[in-house]
Image (tube, helix red, strand yellow):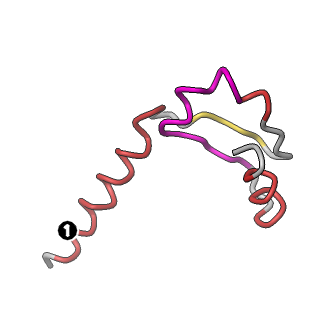
């Protein structure tokens, strides 16, 4: 992960990077190693962010496909 964020930072120049899902469980061990030039924040849903996003995406697709 520490090698990935500088690439995202360089290519996309985001104002903020939000990290969620399982990586937040190890936050204390690696957060200090991350050095993006933008703001780095934990997802509001914490470790559940990924599964909630996937469920929301799926629910939206089912609703859209049923019309």
Percent coordinates x, y for residue 34 in the rendering = 78, 37
* Residue at 35% across, 54% down: 54
* Residue at 66% across, 36% down: 41
The part of the chain drawn in magenta is 16-30
Percent coordinates x, y for residue 24 in the rendering = 55, 31
Instruction: Please state if 41 lies on the left or on the right of 63 as rendered.
Output: right
Q: Quadrant of the C terminus?
A: bottom left
Q: Is residue 52 above or below residue 9?
A: above
Percent coordinates x, y for residue 26 in the rendering = 58, 26
Q: Is residue 65 above or below residue 45?
A: below
* Residue at 26% across, 69% down: 61
Q: Quadrant of the N terminus?
A: top right
Label 1 packing within 10 angstroms: few (<14), some (14-19), many (20+): few
Percent coordinates x, y for residue 66 in the rendering = 13, 75
* Residue at 62% across, 44% down: 18
Instruction: Please state if 48 lies on the left or on the right of 2 as rendered.
Output: left
Instruction: Return the residue at label 1.
Output: 62
């Amino acid at each position: 992960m520490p090698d990935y964020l500088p690439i995202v930072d360089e290519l996309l120049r985001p104002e903020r990077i939000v990290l969620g899902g399982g990586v937040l469980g190890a936050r204390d061990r690696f957060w200090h190693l991350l050095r993006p030039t933008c703001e780095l924040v934990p997802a509001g849903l914490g470790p559940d962010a990924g599964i909630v996003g996937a469920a929301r995406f799926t629910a939206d697709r089912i609703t859209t496909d049923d019309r």
